[in-house]
Image (spheres, rainbow, N blue to C red):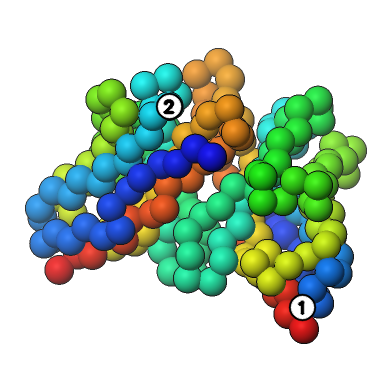
Amino acid sequence: SYELTQPPSVSVSPGQTARITCSGDALPKQYAYWYQQKPGQAPVLVIYKDSERPSGIPERFSGSSSGTTVTLTISGVQAEDEADYYCQSADSSGPWVFGGGTKLTVL
Amino acid sequence: EVQLVESGGGLVKPGGSLRLSCAASGFTFSSYSMNWVRQAPGKGLEWVSSISSSSSYIYYADSVKGRFTISRDNAKNSLYLQMNSLRAEDTAVYYCASHYDSSGYYRVDWGQGTLVTVSS
């Protein structure tokens, strides 16, 4: 089955830039989406179609794509950004495939 | 305001069945694809099943294929997941999520989830 690979954890200090990567063989052909999930809450879409930001999502969240890797970048990280982040894409096995998730810790 | 409210979760024995429901409001339900996603305790998100707006297209994860059935009733603005032959590894919070992607407009909304516990 198709897999999307994320680092288990990323740590940054407040005000710094956090970069979370997601790798998958189908990413050159399929869009990637990013979700933020805080403890006890449902996921929230923060980036869609590789680099588009939904309304209401702060400008410090951005996305990019290069080959088989997509990246979620959070510029000027704030304490409230501490959460789990999941990439999601699609392939022939299903319309939604999730990465394993990355825990972002704000030091 | 989009609202998705899941119900039907609970404790069930291995081999048992459960039917989850998701009541939708605040949007044109019949125009949106719908999905079930689950999250085992302390684990990541796992896609379970998807159904297109008119039920023409249905997809299942390999882990639930043949045991779970997704359906929807556009007249009742409701999504369902019939879960049979439940296993301990099906224990999770089950979220329903709406999905719209057309004409440059993209939106995904999630409910708050319902907990399914499979245990003897």
On-image quarter of the C terminus of chain B: bottom right
Q: How many labels does the image show?
A: 2
Please tell me whether mark 1 sits on a helix, a strand or a loop. Answer: strand
- Taking depth in this image into account, of A55 and B65 the one nearest to the observer is B65
Looking at the image, residue B7 sits to the left or right of residue A37; the answer is right
Residue beneath label 1, please?
B11
Chain holding disc 1: B
Q: Quadrant of residue B6?
A: bottom right
Q: Residue furthest front?
A: A1
Q: Taking B104 as reference, is B11 left or right?
A: right
Tell me if residue B57 comes above or below residue A22 in the rendering.
above
B57 in relation to B80, above or below: above
The one of B70 and A68 positioned closer to us in this rendering: A68
Q: Left or right: where does residue B65 sit relative to residue B61? A: right
Chain letter of disc 2?
A: A
Q: What residue is rendered at 18% in x and 61% in y?
A: A11
Q: Quadrant location of residue B54?
A: top right
Q: How far apart are marks 1 and 2 (CA)?
A: 38 Å
Q: Is mark 2 on a helix, strand or loop?
A: loop
At 54% from the left and 40% from the top, the residue drawn is A1
Pointer 2 local density, CA inside 10 Å: few below 14, some 14–19, many at least 20: some
Amino acid type, label 2: Ala
Q: Residue A105 in the image: state x and y as whole percent.
A: 23, 65
Residue A71 in percent (x, y) is at: 26, 37
Asked if residue A45 shows in the view, the reply is no
User: Which numbered tag is attached to residue A26?
Assistant: 2
State whether residue A80 is above or below residue A26.
below
Instruction: Name the residue type under label 1.
Output: Leu
